[in-house]
Amino acid sequence: MSWLHAMLTEEGSTRSSGLLRILLALVLWTRWGTEVAFFFDQSPARLALGACFYLATTAMLLGVYSRASTAASGLIAMVMVHGFGPAGVEPWTHHHTAYLALATLLAALAPVGHSYSWDKWRAGDALPERAPLWGLRMVALHVSVVYFWTAWDKCFAAFLSGERLEMAFHQLYLGSDPAPAGFGTLMLVGAVLTVLVEYLLVVALWVRRWQWWAMPLGLLMHAAFFTLLPVGTFTATVFACYLAFLDADAVHRILDRVGGRPLDAQVPPG
Amino acid sequence: MSADLPWPRLAAVAAIFAALNAGPLISQGLGYPPVPGLKTWRMYRGFGADICIARFEDRRPDGTSAPLDRFEVLKTTRADAPRYITFIPSEAQVARTGKTMCRRMPGKPHVFVDGECGSRYHWQPMTRLADVDLCGLTEADLGRIDKGGTP
């Protein structure tokens, strides 16, 4: 159980968490910014929702009371998904929105305010860029849970034979025209590969020495989803959440290197 | 278990793990109805169920047949045709498309269709239109097909 002990007690750089906070706030604006803007719907409930959403997410983006504003943004998003959604705003119940809401809520468990935030600018050295990271790993756990159950859900004959993918491609591209030769085989291979990669990523993203291939594989899969299927902000959210798998100190060192700054003495060398 | 394990954190992680898996485990793993508020991860399960593949053909009295291009018969193009002609969503719309084609064709054509429609599982053959001359369908037949019946 040493891995469990390590996960629960791990401390490291908080820059991954800070970046995650900023990226998720931007994805929240991208997904919902227009629909909660005041011009969109002037019912009292929607005006109140818009005010709360923009207040919380703006504070989250800037890192003002970072944990509280991230938690508030996540809770508001959950209310949108599980409250406004079933009450009539059907697109808000979709998987990419539900995933975004929960990822934001879980991000509040990470030390999101210790880096790149107004909180850090105000507190200076009193808020060190090192903190326990178990909360950040909960964001990663969420990714793995989604991969596992989506792969599980695809394990039935109609998907694994490629037929369900064929239908999706007919619905989006081919229409009612018969498919070209070889299309069925392509869909079969695509279906089996999708399930295999999703199951593989459940574990592989957690293993540091495998991340050099697992992470590009996952990014490539989501890039394919984004360009081929109407997945909305799902890809952008998952890309942001991949930060939660990475060695936080390695991310810190890379950011120092990219920024042309001397390596931070607080961060152990890689 | 080590005595220096941070038990409150362990409890929090266990609770989060349970909460994340409860919805999918109950509904997807064990097959019970979804619990409101607990998310399942059934993505794209119904996507593509509203599309049919249709192969129209003109059967001549001498027993021969020739495939028909619905866009050519309807004097349109794939880019200009209405969506319900390009992406035919149901067997009923396949029948209506065929009937419209009959009206645009010279002489007394006999248009038949073969194909399949999407579903949440496998492709479903268009059994209701099997060996049906779409040109012989009346409005009453089309109404019955619309309602899920046979012509």
Image (spheres, coloured by chain):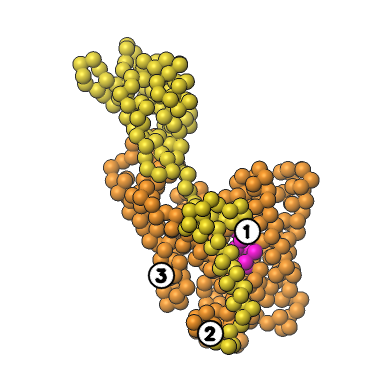
Chain colours: A orange, B yellow
Local packing at callout 1 (Cα closer than 10 Å; few below 14, some 14-19, many 20+) is many
Q: Are marks 3 and 2 on the same chain?
A: no
Residue B4: quarter of image? bottom right
| Residue bounds of the magenta highlight | A100-107
Which residue is the site of mark 3? A213
Of labels 1 and 2, the one closer to you: 2
Q: Main secondary structure of the magenta part?
A: helix
Q: Is residue A124 left or right of residue B63?
A: right
Identify which residue is drawn at 33% across, 49% down.
A161
Chain at tag 1: A
Residue at 54% across / 82% down in the picture?
A5
Question: Hey, what amino acid is under mark 2?
Answer: Met
Q: Quote the CA–CA distance across marks 1 and 2.
A: 34 Å
Q: Amino acid at mark 1?
A: Ala
Residue at the spot of label 1: A101
Q: Chain of mark 2?
A: B
> On screen, A43 above or below A115?
above
Q: Position of residue A242 (x, y in %)?
A: 52, 67
The percent coordinates of residue B86 (x first, y second) are 43, 32
Residue A3, how many percent across, how many down?
50, 80
Q: Secondary structure beneath disc 3? A: helix
Residue lying at the far top in this picture: please name it.
Answer: B107
Secondary structure at numbered mark 2: loop
User: Which mark lies nearer to you, 3 or 2?
Assistant: 2
Q: Give neighbour class at mark 2: few <14, some 14-19, many 20+ (Cα, 10 Å).
A: few
Percent x, y for residue A225? 46, 53
Q: Is residue B76 visible?
A: no
